[in-house]
Amino acid sequence: MNIFRKAYSVAGVVLMIQYLAQLYFVAAAIFTIFQANDNARDVYAAFQNADKFAGLHRANGDLMALTILVMVGCSFGARYPWRTTILTAVVLLLLIVQSILAYTGIPILSGLHGVNALIMIGLSGYLVGRHWAFRGEPAVAGAAS
């Protein structure tokens, strides 16, 4: 078994964990604001508290770029088919689009940030599941006992 195939699988699991962290951080930021009392002091405090989670959301997104770059490199090293390498690079492209969508300033366009995230999660999950390197070796059919 090629070490790059295993590294691709491990990086894929790390990426999936990062996606879960992204969902947690954005939910924590949003609900911190939503649950504030309806007065200026509480709303201001809620935004200050939510800013910590939003910062973690952004920092984790930046780390995801490194994880995806590792996956692209491992895809080359594992000699996966071009389709796999290209789809892994597409995840990186979608991450770049994700960062652009976050800062458009146009709410109807920025809303696609969440839709793009779901596409990224689906594509990454497909790639990790399809190329999982830790499956047991299949038994040889017709082997004598």
Image (tube, rainbow, N blue to C red):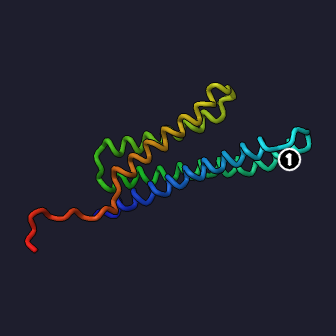
The residue depicted at 55 percent of the width and 49 percent of the height is 19
Identify whether 40 is placed above or below 136: above
Identify whether 9 is placed above or below 143: above
The residue depicted at 39 percent of the width and 51 percent of the height is 128
Task: Pick whichever, 26 or 105, lies toward us.
Answer: 26
- The residue carrying mark 1 is 45
Q: Indicate the quadrant containing the C terminus: top left, top right, bottom left or bottom right.
A: bottom left
Q: Dividing the picture into quarters, in which one does residue 114 lie?
A: top right
The residue depicted at 37 percent of the width and 41 percent of the height is 86
Residue extending furthest bottom?
A: 145
Left or right: where 101 falls relative to 51: left
Instruction: Label 1, secondary structure: give it.
Output: helix
User: Which amino acid is tagged 1?
Assistant: Ala
Residue 41, how many percent across, how many down? Answer: 91, 43
Identify whether 135 is placed above or below 94: below
Residue 80, how many percent across, how many down? Answer: 30, 50
Q: Residues within 10 Å of mark 1 (few under 14, many from 20)?
A: some
Residue 97, how many percent across, how many down? Answer: 54, 35
Left or right: where 78 falls relative to 104: left
Q: Indicate the quadrant containing the N terminus: top left, top right, bottom left or bottom right.
A: bottom left
